[in-house]
Image: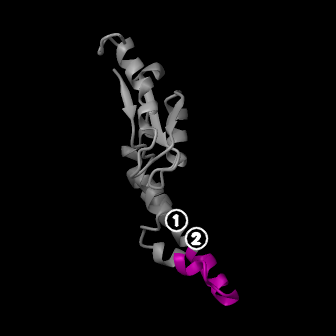
Amino acid sequence: MLGVSRVVLLDVTTVLAQHSLTPSGVTKRVDARCDALGELLSLGLRGIRVAQRERMRAAHWAASPLARPSLVAPENVIIIAGEADVVTDMQHAQPLATHFNTPLTTFQGGHPLHLGRTRAFVPVGEMLRRAGLLDRAP
């Protein structure tokens, strides 16, 4: 069994929070502009956001790769992440690499510009060759 994750998504709640796509995302943007009285109010709103994020994380936990031990040997898993990725950045990739006990392979680009992606796929070819799924390199 082999596994390659190129679009590294730790969990949907992390993406939603990063990009203020939760229902409280509007509040998050308003919080940044609060005055002294607004700051007191925003403390309560931040608490609501944290609770909301935790409820979402719990609801989506069953779909998380971190929710269970890997059935794939670490030498057969490759996590590839774009260093400049603004959609699924390193805070998604690193926990997955740690969970699967495999090195994190990176390339310069990310969504949507895949600069240096060819170099990042070299380990994938090597893994497929070891598994006998590709011919040996010429």
User: What residue is rendered at 39% in x and 38% in y?
Assistant: 6
Q: What residue is pinned by disc 1? A: 51
Q: Choose top left, top right, bottom left or bottom right for residue 12.
A: bottom left
Residue 23, image x and y in percent? 42, 72
Q: Amino acid at mark 1?
A: Ala
User: What residue is rendered at 58% in x and 79% in y?
Assistant: 31
Location of residue 27 with respect to 21 vertically, above or below: below
Q: Amino acid at mark 2?
A: Gly
Residue 102 can be seen in this image: yes
> Which quarter of the image is occupied by the N terminus?
top left
Q: Depth check: give the residue in front, 107 or 75.
A: 107
Please, what secondary structure does the residue beneath circle 2 have? Answer: helix
Residue 71 can be seen in this image: no
Which circle marks residue 102 in the picture? none
Residue 48, image x and y in percent? 53, 72
* Gap between marks 2 and 1 measured at Cα: 6 Å
Which circle marks residue 47 in the picture? 2
Direction front: furthest residue: 138
Read off the magenta span.
29-45
Task: Tell me, yes or no, whether the two marked residues, 2 and 1, touch with CB atoms within 8 Å.
Answer: yes
> Which quarter of the image is occupied by the C terminus?
top left
User: What residue is rendered at 39% in x and 43% in y?
Assistant: 7
Inspect the magenta stretch and tell me whether residue 23 lies in it: no
Q: From the viewer's perspective, is 30 left or right of 34?
A: left
User: What residue is rendered at 43% in x and 34% in y?
Assistant: 68
Residue 83, image x and y in percent? 53, 45
